[in-house]
Image (spheres, rainbow, N blue to C red):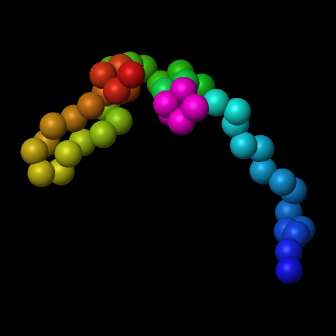
Amino acid sequence: MFFKSKLPDIKIPEEGIYQFITSNPKGIPDDKVCYIDGITNEYYTFGKFK
């Protein structure tokens, strides 16, 4: 048995996960921190992540 949501279908991007994550559609600066390791305090910026 199948169920259909009353909500509209969602759009699934037709690109790879890496391209989707690193596309930066909001124009976040490359020097902004995006990840901090809570144990070692090591951090990554958006530019370093690319």
- Which residue reaches farthest front? 1
Residue occupying image coordinates x 54% and y 36%: 17
Q: Main SS type for the magenta part?
A: helix
Residue occupying image coordinates x 12% and y 51%: 39
Write down the region rendered in magenta: 16-21
Could you say which quadrant of the image residue 43 lies in? top left
Residue occupying image coordinates x 24% and y 42%: 36
In magenta segment, residue 50: no
Can the viewer see residue 5 in this picture? yes
Question: Measured from the top left, where is residue 40 in percent x and y?
Answer: 10, 45
Residue occupying image coordinates x 70% and y 36%: 13
Pick the front one: 30 or 22: 22
Question: Measured from the top left, where is residue 15 in percent x and y?
Answer: 64, 30
Can the viewer see residue 26 in this picture? no
Pick the front one: 22 or 30: 22
Question: Measured from the top left, where is residue 48 in percent x and y?
Answer: 30, 22
Could you say which quadrant of the image residue 47 lies in? top left
Side (left or right) of 25 relative to 46: right
Question: Measured from the top left, where is residue 33 in percent x and y?
Answer: 31, 32
